[in-house]
Amino acid sequence: MSSSAEVAKGVTNSIQEYLQSLPRQTFDQLYAQPATCLATLRLLPPIAKQVVMRLLYTQKPVAKADVEVWCFPDHRGDLQDSLSKLSRLHICTDYEEHLQMNRIFQENFHNALVGGGDHVSFGQPMNDNKGEVDIALLDRHAAESWETVLHQLVGTPGDRRPKAVTKLLLASGLQEFPDDGGYSETNEHQKMNITSKGFQFLLLDVNVQVWSLLLQYLGLAERQLNMDIVQVLNFLFQIGSLELGQAYSVEPLTDTQRRVMEDLKYFGIFYQRTKKSRKFYPTRMATSLTSGSMVSSRKPEDSQGYIIVETNFRMYAYTDSPLQIAILSLFVSLQARFQNMVTGLITRDAIREALTKGITSDQIITYLTAHAHPELKKQSPILPQTVIDQIRLWEMERNRLRLSGAWLYSDFTDLNEFTQIVNYAEPLGAVLWKNEKRRTLAVTEEGHENVKSFRKRAAAARAGGAGR
Amino acid sequence: MSCAEDINLLAVVVDTNPAAWAAAASDPDRPLDFVKIIEQLLIFINAHLSLKFDNELAIIASHADQSQFLYPLPPADPLDAADDEPSKPANVYKQFFDVDRAVVSKLKELVDDKRTKSAEHENRSMVAGSLALALSYINRIKRANENNSVQSRILILSISPDLPSQYIPTMNCIFAAQKVSTRIDVCRFSGRKYGGESVFLPQASHITAGIYLDIPEPSNLLQYLLYTFLPEPSMRKTLLLPHKDQVDFRAACFCHKNVVDVGYVCSVCLSIFCSLSKKCPTCQTVFPAPK
């Protein structure tokens, strides 16, 4: 459980970081939508949430000293952190030792609570009288689309290669062209290669994958597609508040938002029966965007876990999904493939190959643990300890050589001079290597200046002593 | 911050005793409007739901002769399956809409109910039954989410006077709540013609480490609710919240249901009596005759 909690935390942090990078005016436009206010509130730490709720129905600015006594003295630090977060998100502003809530946020969050205003930010539901679309279909659609994206990433041959996906994978640095030719319309169909970042991406949790791609999309929308970032963000926060299995009307959406929907459709975030359809269905991927809870968007049988690892480094994976097999082949040398399973061996060569691609041993271990077969999960630790240790050792093997800048001191006239310098340099931690027989000494770059001046002083003292 | 991942369950027990609310509405000093109180309560409930995606909620009406769930309603309820179900307006968050609609329609049903009309002149509220319902619902949610820890608390909005005949069930519920570490918060209205000093409810919040608050200014109820009762149990270590220093530990006797200061206690079963008898009516122990 703790790993998924950490993942959720990571997701909220990355969204917050993105939001904090936006200019103030953008926030005022963002908070004009109650759905955005609601989603932003849910991103906040618990104390900040309470502060917002307390200030919500307070019209006048509140003295900061008064806010401070809300907390027990030993939690003042947490409160300060929360307050600074609030001001970075422009929910509250500091002014002359007083806290003043952003009026726009205040008004629209109140609208969200009482359901007032006229903003259509929680989606215009439509009657689905045909009843063809159910939750199972949406889940299937989301899983298939997302898998297609991942397939495209690993380079499985396929005919569905939407331009939006290609562009995004390229912009996020998950894929690149073999020769750094850059992106242009002409070589659009050229085969792209997965980068080391892309490999790491494959081993992440689905929700983190979705969010990191969406954040990339936001950047892309701003820089290349000339979209209004406020509308895109509002739209993303809005779909987080929609209900799974309900049809919503396209009508209230702006042109920008329709374009976003067009692009994001390929990622399985929405479902539309036909391209011209006037309604859309959010999938589980969309509705769990802002929840922070890890509602897996994969099919239940996938999320169950399918990998068995034995102490003899053999791996059995009960899967027929080409994607999962492709991911496994990143760090397992596969031996045989059957109708419902593959077998392989975790070898030094396979792991080393993965390591050279930038995948870390921790990522491999996390992936194997997360997708462990229920039978394997009954053990503690889940993976055999020998295998975990060995994968770590193989990673450490690559770190045997450490490069550091150094100065070489040699050709000392006598042993006395040599030991004098060693005795000076060693307490400083400046000695990297020394050889008494050959009277040679390697000194770190940081320590070089000190050692050099000491040697000069020592030489001068000796010369002086000899002269006397 | 493991507590940040917990599911927060809030069970609200609303005193809907018609006699007390009627008296409150005509109070010369501090008139109370039931509709306005419920409106403020609903905003508070929406605020609770808005804090986190997976916050859970139950609302129970403690009426003059019965206790009823206002939310959540059983899925088979005709109200949910009705064909003329109004579709959600686009300006309202789906979850808020569901709760508000269920509470309002259920309350209307309760007020119009013929059966309660006869009981209306009786100024009482089934708090013990509502507490029992709340605790069983909390238990159900805990069972359903065995993988996640559930933080639960109960909030009682109370206006009726204590009912000594319910002393034993009320205390049983309080101790049950203490055992499952569920805090009981009490929000109490009192004016000249309604409320009055309660003996049982301060004990409830004292025993379960909850908060007891007399609302001095009912028109600002929402602010009291947001300040005092919104922080989830894990936040109570961080935020300074009001607490009642002096708790009246008086009990009601088992024989005549009178609230007593000094009474007789059976040395075997600890039952409390207001008058001396030869045999304990609860456990049939024969007391030695006083010398």
Image: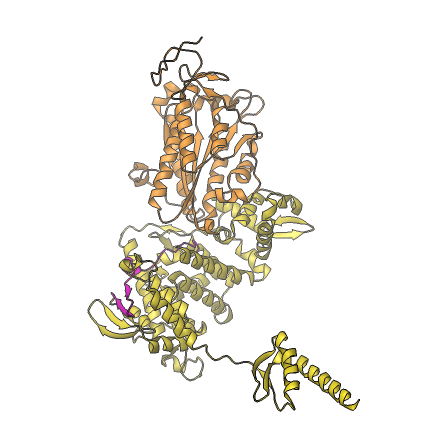
Chain colours: A yellow, B orange
Q: Nearer the viewer, residue A467 or B252?
A: A467
Left or right of A247 in this view: A55: right
**Measuring 44% from the left and 83% from the top, which residue is drawn there?**
A180
Is residue A133 visible in this depiction of the protein?
A: no
Magenta residues, as a range? Answer: A290-317
Left or right of B142 in this view: A28: right
Note whether B130 is above or below A161 in the view shown.
Answer: above
- The answer to whether residue A291 is magenta is yes
Question: Residue A301, how many percent across, how many down?
Answer: 27, 59
Is residue B30 visible in this depiction of the protein?
A: yes
Q: Residue furthest right?
A: A468
**Location of residue A177 by image quarter:** bottom left
Note whether B82 is above or below B117 in the view shown.
Answer: below
**Location of residue B135 by image quarter:** top left
Left or right of B221 in this view: A206: left
Q: How many numbered tags mark residues here?
A: 0
Q: Which of A310 and B289 is in front in this view?
A: B289
Left or right of B30 in this view: B126: left
- The answer to whether residue A182 is magenta is no
Q: Residue furthest left?
A: A339
Indicate the quadrant containing the C terminus of chain B: top left, top right, bottom left or bottom right: top left
